Amino acid sequence: MLKDPVDLQSVRRVLVTKLRHHGDVLLASPVFSVLKAHAPHLEIDALVYADTAPMLTGNPAVSRVIAVDRGWKSLGWLARAGAEWGALQQLRSREYDMLIHLSEHPRGAWLARLLGPRFRVAADHPRAHRWWKSSFSHLYPLPRNGRRHVVELNLDALRRIGLQPGEQERGLCFVPGDEAEHEVERMLGELGLTPGGYVHLHPASRWQFKCWPAAKTADLIDQLQALGERVVLSAAPDADELALVRRIGALARTPFADVSGRLTLKQLGALTRNARLFIGVDSAPMHIASAVGTPVVALFGPSGEFNWGPWQVPHRVVASDHACRPCGNDGCGGGKVSDCLSTLTVSAVLQAVQDLQPR
């Protein structure tokens, strides 16, 4: 394993891999921005899952976004082998000088060996096999107390090779794009809303144990609108998320604007960017709000705000003082319901809204 820093002037092309979920990919965006700021000549490619690619497309620091389709796993062995071989050949054609691998995914070790870049950077994961660790030239340590924001953990890969990120370089980057902006402008017009004239509420997560109860969300909507706010509610086009929205709608006493299941990720970003405030749980939309600079009220339960909290944006975190949190479990006892989240009060969320944006 090499100990010396890397002379970025000797590097022409870099591949950054982040084979994780949407929020994880967005929280890796500062790696691209910082690299490009310190070495503008670099071509920096991203390798991500296909469904997460919109988190990085349009980012001015990213040269190419190369996608791995999760659906390959369901193909027959011959079709999957063909897809994998095509992806490998595409990566090989880029002739990378450096690989920065930002997860424990075993694909990173294989790529480090098969692509043969001179510099190969990854975290020193304690549970990783010796073969995996020996695939990389530069390993960086993980904090033992676990209380480090994921953005900083990603940037540690750059610190390991001798690049110290400046404070103003660490922001998230999400680019909705003109098409999404125009479509959201049209939607807002149909709803009788203007930019800055509404609160964006995204109550759902792909993980049910991160969701606040429907009854409390409905009560929050009613109380916000009683204060004169207009609330726009969104959710992914997912059966569970849409079911949660229907429960909220049945319980709310006041009508709200509902765009659930109608937005692409880019349109979601445009909707959030034009909002006065974003309210939501620990989820990718909360990170998108941080990236587009919209103030955030975030509700946290079994996940830790010191790892996953809103990044470099005005915000308030609403969380309980349960001694067991953050546990990371799939609800208390694995029951999909997290007491530390479900017991958060509507008044606490309203107070956070008022503290963040006093009227």
Image (tube, rainbow, N blue to C red):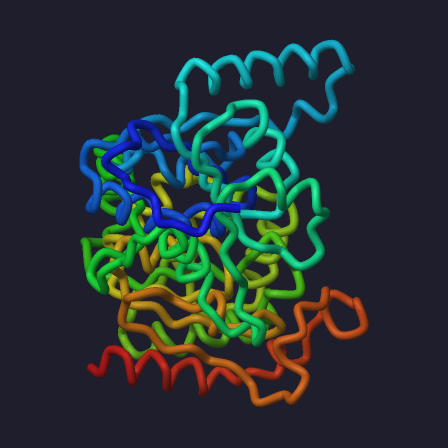
In what quadrant of the picture does the C terminus appear? Answer: bottom left
> Which of the pair 212/109 is nearer the observer?
109
Residue 93, image x and y in percent? 43, 13
Drawn side of residue 355 relative to residue 337, left or right: left
Vertical placement of residue 277 versus 91, above or below: below
What residue is rendered at 54% in x and 63% in y? Answer: 142
Is residue 128 something one can see in this rendering?
A: yes
Is residue 46 toward the left or the right of residue 143 in the image?
left
Residue 306 x/y as whole percent: 47, 73
The location of residue 239, given as percent across then percent down, is 64, 45
What residue is at 45 percent from the left and 41 percent from the top?
100
Q: Quadrant of residue 348?
A: bottom left
Could you tell me which residue is drawn at 41 percent across and 34 percent down? 98
Is residue 187 among what the camera can see? no
Tally the marks.
0
Measuring from the top left, give residue 143's x and y in whole percent. Answer: 53, 69
323 sits left or right of 315 in the view? right
